[in-house]
Structure formats: structure tokens, C-alpha cells
Amino acid sequence: MTSSRSESEVAPFTPAAGFHWLTPFYDFGVAVLTRESHWRNRLVAQVGPSPDDVIADLGCGTGSLLVKLGTAARGVKLVGIDPDPTVLDRARAKTGRAGVAVDLVQGFARDASSLLRGRAVTKIVSSLVFHQVALSEKSAALGAAYEALSPGGELHIADYGLQRTKLMRRLFRATVQNLDGTENTEPQARGVLPELIRSAGFSEVVELEVVFASTGSISLIRALRL
């Protein structure tokens, strides 16, 4: 497993749990509040990793998804990108304990096309990241993902999407928006993500599943780069 970091100072970003001091509790909170074992396993099944794949995780956080992907398909080439050096350290430790080889890169999703250049990426994944960033960053990251993927490549996202019921909207406001604010999260709650994915150039954008959790509903989305 290797790790690289950008030479320039990293611009401000939203920490995994909304605040830096909550980072040590992030994994526990996600596991308890979001039905993580269900939606993450469903996402891995949706991705269908194989040893021939090169998979990049945008906003890889503490590496939970990378571990599951690497365990599901031994020999798969994995790249994790995240701007937060603290969570990358946690990802390094977690993937190391699991015996999963990962190239961890410090950087932003919006720079994925340059960070992944020459890697022949077949699939890009992201989980619980897009709701935390500004609308312009969502679009930039999706555009970069499109450019980074090889023709025929796939995009797989698990994130808060359209909150369809009054209960889900209330839960989302009380938890996610309480931590991450409303400016970046509200567009997701109104269902903007599939349209942004299409605008980035992706085809066959499909919401395959909606998982209800105590933090709101999480959408599992697949799209193709033709």
C-alpha cells in the first residue's frame, strides 16, 4: 500500500463527521445511525468488483468501503482519494489490518481526473460524500469522475438523495443537516444528484435502491460512462 499527498496546502473541507473533533467517532456513528452494514454490502454487490477492476473511491474517508471491495475481490486494484490527512491515516491502518492493498492519495474529488491519470480506472465509487460539498463541488467532482473513467466505466454512489416522506425529511434535518448544515445538503434532499450525474455526461443513471435509516434515506445510484 502506498500513500501520496499533494505538496500544496489543502484547502478547507468538511470533515467526515461534520467537525474535526468528531472524526474519532465517525465510524461508530455511521454504523449505528445509517444501517451501514446493509447499504454498504448492497453497494459492494452493486459494484461487483473483480480482480481485473481498477476502482477509485472518491472521498474514501476511513477506508470502510475500500476494505469491503478488497475483501470481495482479492487482487482488485484500489485507489482511495480524500482531502483529510487524519482520515487517510485511519484508512491506512484499517486497510492494513485487513490485508487490503490500497493506494491512498490526498486530494479532492474535483481533481480526480488528474489524480487518476494513467490508471485505466474501470469503476468509481463514493459513499456519503456528495451531500457534504457545495453544489459547484458536486458538479466538478462528477465531471472529473467522468473524465477519469475509461470508456464503458461505471459510477456507483451511495448517498443521501431525495427525502421522499415527511419522516425522512425530519430525520435528515435532525441529524445530517444539524451536523453538515443546509446549504450543501438541501439540494441532495430535493433529489438533485441524478440530474447532476446526467449533466456530467453519464448515461443510464438509475437509482437502484433506497435504504431508510434514522438519518434519512440513502440512495444507491449507478451510472455508465459510454
Image (spheres, rainbow, N blue to C red):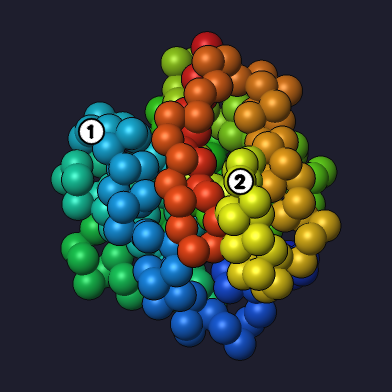
Q: Is residue 29 above or below residue 171?
A: below
- Residue 79 percent across, percent down from the top left: 42, 49
Left or right, 195 with reference to 202: right
Can see residue 132? Answer: yes
Q: Who's the residue at 82% across and 57% down the image?
A: 183
Callout 2: helix, strand or loop?
loop
- Which image quadrant for residue 174? bottom right
Q: Who's the residue at 31% across and 52% down the image?
A: 38
Q: Who's the residue at 59% across and 55% down the image?
A: 167
Residue type marked 2:
Thr
Considering the image in quadrants, where does the N terminus appear?
Answer: bottom left
**Residue farthest to the bottom, as pictured:** 21
Which-is-in-front pick, marks 1 and 2? 2
Q: Nearer the viewer, residue 215 or 199?
A: 215
- Which image quadrant for residue 95? bottom left
Residue type marked 1:
Ser
Q: Is residue 213 above or below residue 139?
A: below
- Residue 70 percent across, percent down from the top left: 25, 50
The residue that label 1 is drawn on is 50
Q: Nearer the viewer, residue 128 or 65?
A: 128
Q: Nearer the viewer, residue 219 or 52?
A: 219
Left or right, 5 with reference to 90: right
Callout 1: helix, strand or loop?
loop
Q: Is residue 207 above or below residue 219?
A: above
The residue that label 2 is drawn on is 165
- Residue 166 percent across, percent down from the top left: 65, 51
Query: CA separation, marks 1 and 2?
Result: 37 Å
Chain-order first, disc 1 or disc 2: 1
Q: Nearer the viewer, residue 159 or 80?
A: 159
Can see residue 81? Answer: no
Q: Mark 2 and mark 1 in contact (Cβ < 8 Å)?
A: no
